[in-house]
Amino acid sequence: MNPALRKAAIVILSLDKPLAAEVLSQLRKDEVEALTMEITRLSDVTKEEQEVAIDEFYNLGMARVQIERGGIEYAQNLLEESLGKEKAQQIIDSVKQSMLSVPFGFLHKAGADNLLTFIQEEHAQTIALILSHLPATLAAEVLAGLPSNKQLEVVRRVANMEQTSPEVIRDVERSLEVRMSSAFNQQLEKAGGVQSVAQILNVADRMTNKGILENLQEDDPDLVDQIKRLMFTFDDLMKLDNKSIQALLKEVENSQWAMALKGASEELRQKVMGNLSQRAAVMLQEEMEYLGPVRVSDVEAMQQVIVDSVRRLEDAGEIVISAGADAEKMVS
C-alpha cells in the first residue's frame, strides 16, 4: 500500500465532484490511473485519517503559494535581519494564524448545495450572518437555493446588519463547523469504490474521461466495465423509456436539444423526435439545420446540461434510469 497515494485519494474524495474531475484532468495519465485504482479500493477511512490527509495537503499548498508569491518569506527575512530568528518566527506564526482565522473560512471550499443542506432551516438572521462572510459568488448561489420568502428575509437582514460581536460569530461558526464535520465524516467513511470513480468521471471533460478509461482498459477491463455501468452519458438517453423522454422534453428547450443532438447518433435523434408531435419534430429538425456547423465543445456542454436534467428528474423520482448495457461513448 502506498500511504501517499491513499492520502491523495482521500483528498480527491473530499472535493466536490466537478473540482475533483478538474484536478484529475491536470495530472499525468499514469498518475490518474494509479489514483483511480486507489479510489476504487478505498474503504474504512476514519475521521482522523481524513483530517490528517486534508491538513497535510492544505499545508503543502499554502507553503507553495507563499513561496511562489514571496510575501511571507520576504517578510520573514526582513524580520530576522532586524529582530533575530526566534522573535521573527513568533511574529510570522502569529501573522499566519491571523490570516487563516477568517470567520466562516472553512465554508469557502464547500459547495452551495452542501451549505444549503445545513443552513436552510436556520433562522434568517443566522443565515444572513453566514452569507455576509462568504465570497459574493458563493453567497449568491446559496441565496438562490432558499425559498423565495426566506430570500427576502435574509436580504433585508444582511442589508440592515450592524457590527456583530466576535463571540456571537465564533459561537455560530463553531456550531456549524461541528455539525458539518460530523455529517461529512460519516459520508466520507462510506466513500470510495467504483461508484465514486463513476461519479467523478461523469462530470469530467470528455478528454479526461476517455483517457482514464482507455488507460484503465489495458490493465483492468473488468473495472472499466463496472465504472461504465455506473456512469450515465448523453448517449445513454437510449436507455430511457418514452415516458421518461417525454418528461425530459418538458424540461429542456428546443434550442438546447438542437445543439445537443448535433453530436448524437441518428438512432438517438429519432428516439427524441419520435416523442415529439410531428410539427414539433419538424421545427426541431429545422432548428438543427439552421445552426449549421457548431463547435464540438458547445455540443458537449449542452449534452452535459441535458444529462444534468436527467439526474435532477431521477432524484425527484420523475424518471427511472434503466440499468443494463454499458454506456456508449458520445460521438461528435
Image (cartoon, rainbow, N blue to C red):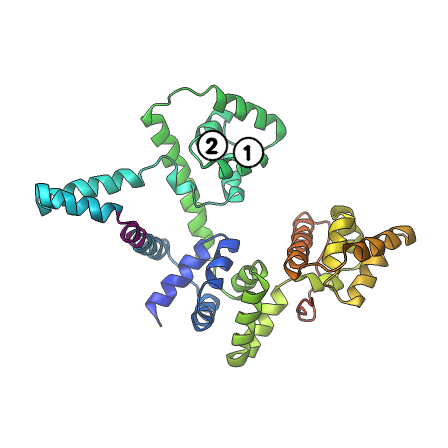
Say few, some or many: other residues with alpha carbon within 10 Å of mark 1 (under 14 / 14 to 19 / 20 or more). many
Quadrant of the frame with the N terminus: bottom left
Q: Is residue 322 visible?
A: no
Q: Which mark is residue 131?
A: 2
Q: CA distance from mark 1 to mark 2?
A: 8 Å
Residue 40 place in picture, x, y as percent? 48, 68
Circle 1/circle 2 CB separation < 8 Å: yes
Q: Amino acid at mark 1?
A: Leu
Q: Please tell me in which quadrant of the rendered image residue 262 appears.
A: bottom right
Relative vertical location of residue 119 with respect to residue 237 in this rendering, above or below: above
* Magenta residues, start to end: 63-70
Relative vertical location of residue 329 with respect to residue 244 in this rendering, above or below: below
Q: Is residue 113 left or right of residue 279?
A: left
Q: Earlier in the sequence, mark 1 or mark 2?
A: 2
Q: Is residue 147 left or right of residue 313?
A: left
Magenta stretch holds residue 120: no
- Residue under the point 37% across and 67% down: 5
- Residue under the point 36% across and 29% down: 169
